[in-house]
Image (tube, rainbow, N blue to C red):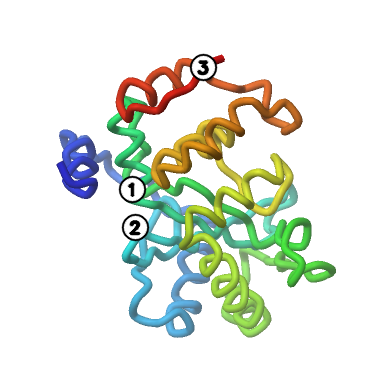
Amino acid sequence: MRCSELIVRHQQRPDRTLPMPREGKNGRFGRLVCESLEPHLGQTYQYTGPPHDGFRRQTSFGHRSVMVHLWGANPPYRHLEFMLGVWHDKFEAVRLQLNLTPTIAGADHSWQATGNLSAGWDLFKGRSGTWDANLNEDPAVIIPQVVPFLSEAIRVVFGACADLRRIRKLLLQGHDGPLFTSEPWQEIALIDVVLTDWQHLTEFIRRTDLPFSARRDMNLIKGIQNAFGFEHSA
């Protein structure tokens, strides 16, 4: 079965859509941010709508997303940043072949916030990817400050994350590295499966120096052995 067919099959679930709650201040501000950004992103990015305002673009490997993220504990003042995420169809297909819990449809496998780019991406060191926002004001006034940085972040981050080998390299730098994922050890192992890079997987299993080495999952490795013929001895 082709990976796209496998993914669609696992994402076909009964429609249990609940009525959307009334739009709050955060939701209104996020929507207005998207309305102001849309002309700058172009027609290839489609608005996702609430509850997570942002944009998604289909790609040859899956999708990429740009989501509004507001944080801060002193309303109406908030910090505005954007979550940049990627989904790879081949990666998800491997997850499903191993009977792992399907990733929520439309979610991202790996991501990073623009506010954290200065920590792990040399090009953004010393630069802020966070902007002061007031939920009572029209965000259109700060969009001219946002667009140059966000456009560059989209180009750099998505340029790197289109390639699973580069994603693997970024994830290997650790929890506070340039890229996030919910289960880094598992994701790196699964990327090796997608790439059929059995030598790297063998060496990766033996590593004890990584921040997430303690989360080594040998049950996952057994599943990979059974499903893909990977040979490994402890």
The CA distance from mark 2 to mark 1 is 8 Å
Asked if the residues shown at circle 3 and circle 1 are in contact, with their CB atoms under 8 angstroms apart, the answer is no
Q: Position of residue 113 (x, y in %)?
A: 63, 56
Q: Position of residue 97 (x, y in %)?
A: 28, 31
Q: Position of residue 155 (x, y in %)?
A: 55, 75
On the question of residue 77 being in view, the answer is no
The CA distance from mark 3 to mark 2 is 34 Å
Q: Nearer the viewer, mark 3 or mark 2?
A: 3
Which numbered tag is attached to residue 90? 1
Q: Residue at x 45, y 61 (%)?
A: 65
Task: Tell me the kind of residue under disc 1.
Answer: Lys
Q: Secondary structure at mark 3?
A: loop
Q: Nearer the viewer, mark 3 or mark 1?
A: 3
The CA distance from mark 3 to mark 1 is 26 Å
Mark 2 Cα shell of 10 Å, populated few (<14), some (14-19), many (≥20): some
In the image shown, does 188 or 45 lie closer to the viewer? 188
Q: Does residue 214 appear to the left or right of 89 in the view shown?
A: right
Q: Earlier in the sequence, mark 3 or mark 1?
A: 1
Q: Earlier in the sequence, mark 2 or mark 1?
A: 2
Mark 1 Cα shell of 10 Å, populated few (<14), some (14-19), many (≥20): many
Q: Residue at x 34, y 66 (%)?
A: 59
Q: Which residue is mark 2?
A: 62
Quadrant, the N terminus: top left
Task: Tell me the kind of residue under disc 2.
Answer: Gly
